[in-house]
Image (tube, grey):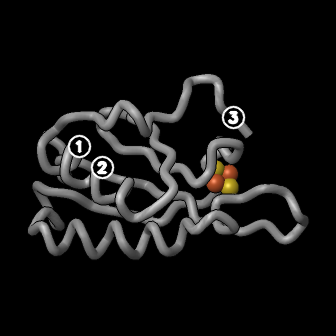
Amino acid sequence: MSYYRHHVFICLNQRSNGEACCAQQGAQAAFDHCKAKVKAEGLAGPGGVRVNKAGCLDRCAGGPVAVVYPEAVWYTFVDNADIDEIVESHLKNGRVVERLVLPADVGR
Ligand code: FES
């Protein structure tokens, strides 16, 4: 049994060279919202859900991106409603949000 039931990594990478990055697309706000939502739902902590900052996950073209382990499900999202759906459906009830899954061919 893993320490966390779900471990979420959200890319917050910021690039200064003008290339696309998740930080330019609201990743910090999404991260903050996700942390708050997980806590508010009583999901945070050992045996539950951990949300961590990540550097570049090398799938920037689909940014902002997040990955949920142990399932290794990759998501892209645009707003807090998307984050809420991932928390409610996947992290709380174990159902992947198919409409937000990052297509397999999206890379950097
Ligand atoms: S900058 Fe977020 S995946 Fe690369």
* Chain-order first, disc 3 or disc 1: 1
Q: Confirm if mark 1 falls within 8 A of ligand 1.
A: no
Lower position in the chain sequence, tag 3 or tag 2: 2
Instruction: Between residue 39 and residue 101, name the one nearer to us.
Output: 101
Determine the image quadrant of residue 58.
Answer: top right
Is residue 51 placed above or below 61 in the rendered structure? Answer: below
- 60, 5: nearer the viewer: 60
Left or right placement of residue 8 versus residue 30 in this view? left
Residue under pointer 3: 107
Image height of 23 relative to 10, above or below = below
Mark 3 CB in 8 Å range of ligand 1? no
Q: Position of residue 53 (x, y in %)?
A: 48, 66
The quarter in which the C terminus is drawn is top right
User: Gap between marks 2 and 1, in whole Å?
Assistant: 5 Å
Numbered tag placed on residue 86 in the rendering: 2
Kindly identify the residue that appears in the image at 40 percent across and 34 percent down: 99
Q: Which residue is found at the position 18% from the left and 44% from the top?
A: 2
Give the number of marks: 3
**Mark 2 residue element:** helix
Figure quadrant of residue 45: bottom left
Q: Is there a contact, CB below 8 Å, between mark 2 and mark 1?
A: yes
Of residue 77 and residue 58, the one placed in the foreground of this image is 77
The residue carrying mark 1 is 90
At mark 3, the secondary structure is loop
Q: Amino acid at mark 3?
A: Gly
Which residue is painted at 85% across and 57% down in the image?
19
Instruction: Sort mark 3 into few (<14), some (14-19) or many (20+) by Cα contacts within 10 Å.
Output: few
